[in-house]
Amino acid sequence: MSRTLIIACGALAREIVALRRLNDWPYMDVQCLPAELHNRPEKITAAVKEKITLNRSAYTSIFVAYADCGTGGLLDAMLLQEGVQRIPGAHCYEFFAGSSAFEALNERELGTFYLTDFLLEHFDRLVIRGLGIDRHPALLETIFANYRKLVYLVQVPRAGKVEQARCAAERLGLEFDYQVTGYGGLEHSLKRANQGVVFWQN
């Protein structure tokens, strides 16, 4: 029986599992890489390639749930060689918001820091501790010097989350806004992957 493997950023794990359940995709497996790789994008390409190599013979198809995510095109170059496709876009945030909406957000304020549901839930671990701000508070001003606004992209509205995101913005010294996006282009891309439209096939 054919099976599809989704190699995903750990920051998307909850959303992908939720979409698998909502859409009844029993033949889709998900393997996630650590979300902390977002802080070390130079390691993403090798980590994704290792997953492809280890799993190629076990699956009919493989699809990568990563955007470029700061790899500077290296991820795309590797995936081209491997014959594997990925979700379109430069950032994970882009396919939640949709490309046109994401472009509009960037045009309004280039210096925007984005939070998703996952990043909000793990804000201290991935942002404050992940960037070393807890150990070196002066880094906050250095890292966020070119940011002006924090935008919370809401996948699933939950009580208190907007206020939690507002507090995160205040902590970083940024203006705040939020937008309910749902699963956006992530759901569309995974549907296509499960229909055999955009993936390498064994």
Image (spheres, rainbow, N blue to C red):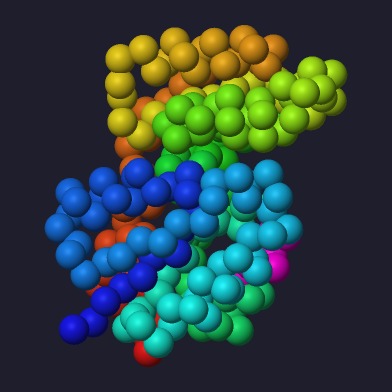
Above or below residue 143? Residue 184 is: below
Above or below residue 110? Residue 171 is: above
- Asked if residue 196 lies in the magenta stretch, the reply is no
Residue for point 52% across, 12% down: 166
Residue nearest the observer in this picture, 54 or 149? 54
In the image: residue 158, left or right of residue 152: left
Q: Quadrant of the C terminus?
A: bottom left
Residue for point 84% across, 19% down: 138
Residue nearest the observer in this picture, 42 or 73? 42
In the image: residue 11, left or right of residue 44: left
Q: For residue 89, say whether it is visible.
A: no
Query: Quadrant of residue 30 in the image?
Result: bottom left
- Asked if residue 72 lies in the magenta stretch, the reply is yes
Q: For residue 13, say whether it is visible.
A: yes
Q: Quadrant of the N terminus?
A: bottom left
Query: Quadrant of residue 82 in the image?
Result: bottom right
Residue 9 location in percent, x, y? Answer: 50, 53
Residue for point 75% across, 30% down: 132
Query: Quadrant of residue 29 in the image?
Result: bottom left
Above or below residue 80? Residue 174 is: above
- The magenta span reads 71-76
In the image: residue 81, left or right of residue 9: right
Residue 84 location in percent, x, y? Answer: 49, 77
Q: Residue furthest front?
A: 135
Residue 133 location in percent, x, y? Answer: 74, 24
In the image: residue 181, left or right of residue 37: left
Residue nearest the observer in this picture, 93 or 124? 124
Residue 65 location in percent, x, y? Answer: 45, 59
